[in-house]
Image (cartoon, grey):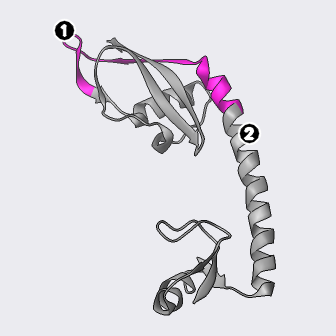
Amino acid sequence: MEVILREDIEKVGHRGEAVKVAPGFARNFLLPKKLAVIATDANRKIVDQEREAYLRREAKAKNEAEDLGRMLAGVTITITQRAGEEGHLFGSVTAKDIADALERQNYTIDRRKIQLEDPIKNTGEYKVPVRLHREVTTDLNVNVLAE
């Protein structure tokens, strides 16, 4: 069965592509969840219009993310926590702590966009990547100081 995808689906195809899938997969999964439509000429036109609108929205979001990334590049966040004599923190600095510190400086960034691999457990300077958009990532300077 040939369908036109309305969303990117892993191992099947990308948005706007016409792909052949098993009839059961289309009937039971893709069509009910509105992830695809049956490939007809009318549906092709509708999907093309949706794709153009999506690309415009995506370009606008990317430009906004790039602007925010340039603003964040010069920002340094300072977080103070209790620490031992060797600089080992009694707790840890997480993405939520960094997001809260950014909030205090009037930057609203979702904590899930802060790509902190492991919580910070020692004092020092760190560069933490912040993924503002699928294609835009910037580094944020974070200073962790002992209280």
Circle 2 Cα neighbour tier, 10 Å, few/some/many (<14 / 14–19 / ≥20)? few
Q: Choose between 49 and 131: the one closer to the eye.
A: 49
In the rendered view, would you say 93 is above or below 122? below
Span of residues in magenta: 67-91
**What residue sits right under mark 1 in the picture?**
86
Q: Residue, x 67% and y 31% (percent of image)? A: 68
- The residue type indicated by label 2 comes to Asn
Residue 79 is one of the magenta-drawn residues: yes
In the rendered view, would you say 108 is above or below 70? below
Q: Is residue 50 left or right of residue 72?
A: right
State the CA–CA distance, disc 2 to disc 1: 43 Å
Tell me the element at label 2. helix
Q: Is residue 86 left or right of residue 63?
A: left
Where residue 137 sits in the image (x, y, percent)? 56, 34
Residue 63 is tagged as 2
In the rendered view, would you say 134 is above or below 37? above
Number of marks drawn: 2
Where residue 112 sits in the image (x, y, percent)? 46, 44
Q: Choose between 106 and 76: the one closer to the eye.
A: 76
Where residue 71 sits in the image (x, y, percent)? 66, 24
Where residue 82 sits in the image (x, y, percent)? 27, 17
State the image quarter where residue 1 is shown: bottom right
Tell me the element at label 1. loop
Circle 1 Cα neighbour tier, 10 Å, few/some/many (<14 / 14–19 / ≥20)? few
Residue 20 is tagged as none
State the image quarter where residue 98 is shown: top left
- The residue type indicated by label 1 comes to Glu
Q: Residue, x 24% and y 15% (percent of image)? A: 83
Residue 127 is one of the magenta-drawn residues: no
